[in-house]
């Protein structure tokens, strides 16, 4: 007999306050069999929510949902409940923190800072639990059995040793993986080195491999406020769904959640398709039983990130008049990174050259001077021949326009921003102002939906 999976969908009625959220969480878990005989007396339950960045829902999981799960675990008999998370690399090393200084663009937030700001720390502790930032957690060097792209990582001991493990994703689109649901959510458990170097063309497989370390016993998804568009951070747009989902199969839950987001064929999502292929769960929607509300009752058509709705080259080549782009042999992630870097370089008043990829074809004489010639990514920096000579000439003259990394991600973006500030192309105060505006936008939106919430700045 073919194995089947069950996913629960519970849609709440407005206004969705803390009491209603508690009821929705309990109903969703009960519909999938509940915690009876699963969480035993004295067990240590570990919860991993998505707290991506220093913004409340829809960027991060609602503190009230997390607290409801903590209380439910204690009611089932848990002796200890820990909530662990590691914020995104962008949050750790790039996002400007306006609370630290009004004069200079101080960067970065720790996970505990984010937990405190969002009220998660207070809500968890009031429910009897504890919070742990991955940066401070004890880790174990762990080999991943059956892995394809990720083979050995430093992994939090508290998750490995947990008696019961709950994965709590948000319902969001994502510029690199189309959506970010339960499979991608476990990325936050890795150390910073492993988190950073995952964002390449093998990202989907990398995410699936993480889930082979410690499969969650339960997934509880916060779909009260989803996010569409260019998620999963500042550029996304809220979608009010009013949904809590639950299931013991993370692949099945991601499959159903994707359909609720208007992706009719959930196997278009790379992480779902690969996880299904690798045997982590059931991605085929015809083998999934949906209980509670139906998909059709809650379904909304989410706007996908622009790179999933039009060819990536339309965002990269022939776009900016001041940029001469030389790109060759670049992976899809470097194409996406190129789009991000070009958007910044468009602010430079002079003409610039941007060199990307393994074997870009560059003319004998560039139209730009060395001060305005940039190499993006490790492949470009490793290219030989004329480009090697060009790099050598730049190094001899002390001109550092080398934006390295595989992928050239947050550290390269910070380096470019610092260069542009130093040259006067970008005002540091503008960065601080932009960070304040982004914070205000998300804070005010969420406060209008939850009048009890105040950020702890």
Image: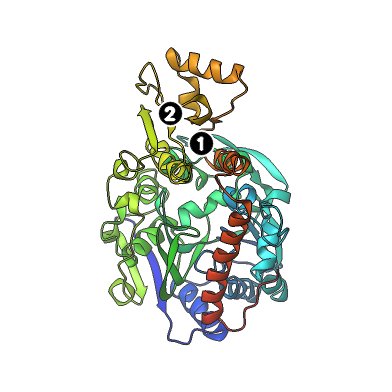
**What's the residue at 71%, 56% (across, down)?**
103
Q: Residue at x 56, y 38 (%)?
A: 412
410 or 77: which is nearer to us? 410
Q: Is residue 283 above or below residue 10?
A: above
Q: Look at the picture and state if 14 lies above or below 275.
A: below
User: What residue lies at 32% left-to-right and 38% top-to-bottom?
Assistant: 317
Place of residue 388 in the rendered image (x, y in percent of width and height, measured from the top left)? 49, 15
Along the line of sight, the residue nearer the viewer: 214 or 409: 409
Task: Say if residue 122 shows up in the picture.
Answer: yes
Q: What is the crowding at mark 1: few (fewer than 14 residues within 10 Å), some, or many (at least 20)?
A: many
Residue situated in front as seen by the camera: 251 or 11: 11
Q: Is residue 123 above or below residue 322?
A: below
* Residue 357 x, y percent position in the rendering: 41, 27
The crowd level at tag 2 (other Cα within 10 Å; few <14, some 14-19, many 20+) is many
Kindly indicate whether the residue at mark 2 contacts the one at mark 1 (C-beta within 8 angstroms).
no
- Between the residue at mark 1 and the residue at mark 2, the CA separation in whole angstroms equals 12 Å
On the question of residue 44 being in view, the answer is: no
Residue 395 appears in which quarter of the rendering? top right
Where is mark 2, residue-wise? 355
Q: Residue beneath label 1, please?
A: 408
Of residue 426 and residue 154, the one placed in the foreground of this image is: 426
Q: 328 left or right of 231? A: left
Disc 1 secondary structure class? loop
């Amino acid at each position: 007999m073919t194995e089947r999976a069950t996913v629960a969908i519970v849609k709440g009625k407005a206004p969705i306050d803390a009491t209603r959220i508690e009821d929705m969480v309990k109903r969703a878990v009960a519909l999938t069999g509940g915690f009876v005989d699963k969480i035993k007396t004295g067990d240590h339950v570990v919860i991993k929510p998505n707290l991506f960045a220093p913004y409340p829902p829809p960027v991060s999981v609602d503190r009230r949902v997390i607290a409801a799960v903590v209380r439910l675990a204690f009611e089932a008999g848990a002796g200890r409940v820990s909530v662990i998370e590691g914020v995104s690399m962008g949050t750790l090393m790039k996002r400007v923190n306006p609370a630290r200084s009004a004069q200079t663009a101080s960067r970065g937030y720790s996970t505990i800072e984010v937990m405190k700001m969002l009220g998660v720390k207070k809500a968890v502790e009031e429910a009897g639990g504890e919070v742990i930032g991955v940066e401070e957690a004890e880790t174990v060097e762990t080999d991943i059995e059956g892995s394809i792209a990720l083979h050995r990582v430093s992994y939090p001991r508290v998750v490995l040793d947990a008696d019961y493990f709950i994965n709590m994703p948000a319902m969001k689109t994502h510029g690199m993986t189309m959506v970010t649901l339960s499979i991608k959510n476990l990325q936050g458990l890795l150390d910073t080195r492993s988190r950073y170097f995952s964002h390449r063309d093998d990202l989907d497989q990398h995410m699936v491999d993480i889930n082979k370390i410690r499969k969650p016993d339960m997934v509880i998804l916060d779909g009260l406020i989803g996010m569409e568009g260019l998620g999963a951070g500042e550029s996304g747009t809220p979608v009010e769904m009013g949904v809590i989902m639950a299931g013991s199969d993370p692949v099945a839950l991601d499959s159903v959640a994707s359909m609720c987001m208007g992706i009719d064929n959930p196997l278009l999502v790379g992480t779902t398709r690969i996880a299904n292929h690798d045997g982590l769960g059931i991605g085929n929607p015809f083998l999934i039983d949906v209980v509670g509300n139906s998909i059709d009752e809650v379904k909304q058509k989410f706007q996908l990130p622009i790179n999933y709705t039009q060819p990536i080259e339309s965002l990269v080549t022939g776009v900016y008049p001041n940029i001469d782009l030389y790109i060759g042999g670049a992976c899809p992630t470097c194409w996406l990174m190129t789009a991000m870097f070009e958007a910044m370089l468009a602010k430079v008043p002079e003409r610039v050259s941007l060199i990307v990829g393994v074997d870009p074809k560059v003319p004998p004489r560039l139209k730009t001077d060395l001060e305005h010639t940039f190499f993006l990514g490790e492949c470009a920096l490793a290219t030989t021949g004329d480009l090697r000579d060009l790099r050598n000439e730049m190094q001899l003259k002390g001109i550092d326009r080398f934006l390295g990394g595989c992928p050239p991600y947050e550290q390269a973006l910070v380096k470019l921003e610092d260069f542009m500030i130093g040259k006067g192309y970008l005002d540091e105060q503008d960065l601080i102002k932009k960070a304040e505006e982004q914070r205000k936008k998300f804070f005010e939106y969420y406060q209008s939906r939850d009048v009890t919430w105040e950020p702890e700045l």
